[in-house]
Image (spheres, helix red, strand yellow):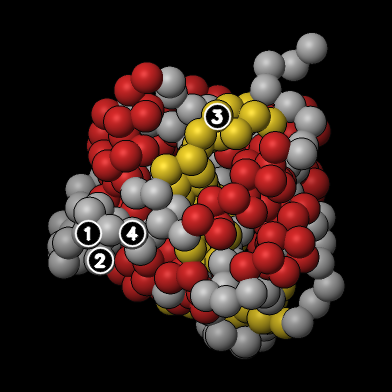
Amino acid sequence: MNTPIKVLIVDDSILVRESARKLLSAQANIQVMDTASDAILAWEKMQRAWPDVIVLDIQMPRMDGISFLRKIMAERPTPVVICSSLIANGAQAGIDALAAGAVGLISKPKTDVLSFFSDESDNIVAAVRAAARSHPERLRAAARAVAPPRAPVESTERLPAAKQPDGRVIALGASTGGTQALETVLSTLPPGLPGIVLVQHMPPGFTQKLADRLNKCTALTVLEAQHKQPVTPGQALIAPAGKQMRLVRGLQAFHVEVLDGPVINRHRPSVDCLFGSVAKAAGAQAIGVLMTGMGDDGALGMKEMHDAGAFTVAEAEETCVVFGMPRAAIERGGVREVVPLHKIADKIRYWATRA
């Protein structure tokens, strides 16, 4: 018999605490071990019995949820799912939570809580189960490899300029734990690289905030992609949440199509969608990198890139918050090299400078 997932619910609303307790306690292999009305009380309870997963509000008395999340990750990394009204519509608090180590986000309403826990029950339970399979101690290792957000620093490294479309393109894909993984990789890349296209699974509204955050820690220009936007050297285009993004080879340059396409492999944007288009548009002139994430999105697209002659890299299990997407790509036979997170930027630079 599987060991139950022990959950601690931290929220200053008694209605939210009891609604969450009722929902999660009714699930197989989930045990709500306790609840707390604020972070200070939660910390006291955690000294007596440590949870497997914490469901955490942000706006609370005595200590806010983001500060508490940072304390947890510094002391004893534990999977945390943020459940808060402050992360609605791509609010900055959501990006701050992911950057601090949260592995899941649930946007709760300010009113009609009972209907919310009924209507969103499947998503809430799925978020808790997914969190229990994550490895936040690897999040802490990734966070230590990245300096706090700072003004972009001019890089002295110079690489040959990429020519489009005869030049090359870099394609990245990530999901759970990807916020920190992308910071780790992009923060050490020089601006002279070929253009970058990437998918990070996020709720609608958050990808612009992610682009803003990444711009503070890299010499690259990071943008939320627009339809028919050219892919240019020294620039990274992020697929907007809720849209599908494809790479297209035009007469003069690569560009991206950003469309209201169907959900692919349970995601929109989908890494499979992007990688498959890169295989067709760029072939052997591309590198594909698949990083931490739940499920298998990107595995099929990476196999297509590999078969088209692209250089393909998967993040190693030792640094993945969730070794799902990279594992699936490896098992499909679409990965040329498997390296830990801190070596991925080196592989991209090597690929970009080789003849």
Q: Nearer the viewer, mark 2 or mark 4?
A: 4
Q: Nearer the viewer, mark 4 or mark 1?
A: 4
At label 1, counting other C-alpha atoms closer than 10 Å, the crowd grade (few under 14, some 14-19, many 20 or more) is some
Helix, strand or loop under label 1: loop
The image position of residue 341, as x and y in percent, is 43, 35
Q: Amino acid at mark 3?
A: Met
Mark 2 vs 4: CB contact within 8 A: no
- In this rendering, is residue 67 above or below 109? above
User: Would you name the residue on which mark 4 appears?
Assistant: 60
State the CA–CA distance, disc 4 to disc 1: 25 Å
- In this rendering, is residue 313 above or below 104? above
State the CA–CA distance, disc 2 to disc 3: 40 Å
Mark 2 vs 1: CB contact within 8 A: yes
Label 2 vs 3, first from the N-terminus: 3
Q: Amino acid at mark 2?
A: Lys
The image position of residue 122, as x and y in percent, is 77, 53
State the CA–CA distance, disc 2 to disc 4: 29 Å
Helix, strand or loop under label 2: loop
- Which label belongs to residue 216? 2
In the displayed structure, does residue 107 sit left or right of residue 161?
A: right
Residue at point 20% right, 48% down? 147
User: Would you name the residue on which mark 1 appears?
Assistant: 149
Label 4 vs 1, first from the N-terminus: 4
User: Would you name the residue on which mark 3 appears?
Assistant: 33
Label 2 vs 4, first from the N-terminus: 4
Task: Kindly tell me whether residue 299 is visible in this rendering.
Answer: yes
Task: Kindly tell me whether residue 231 is visible in this rendering.
Answer: no
Residue at point 51% right, 34% down? 34
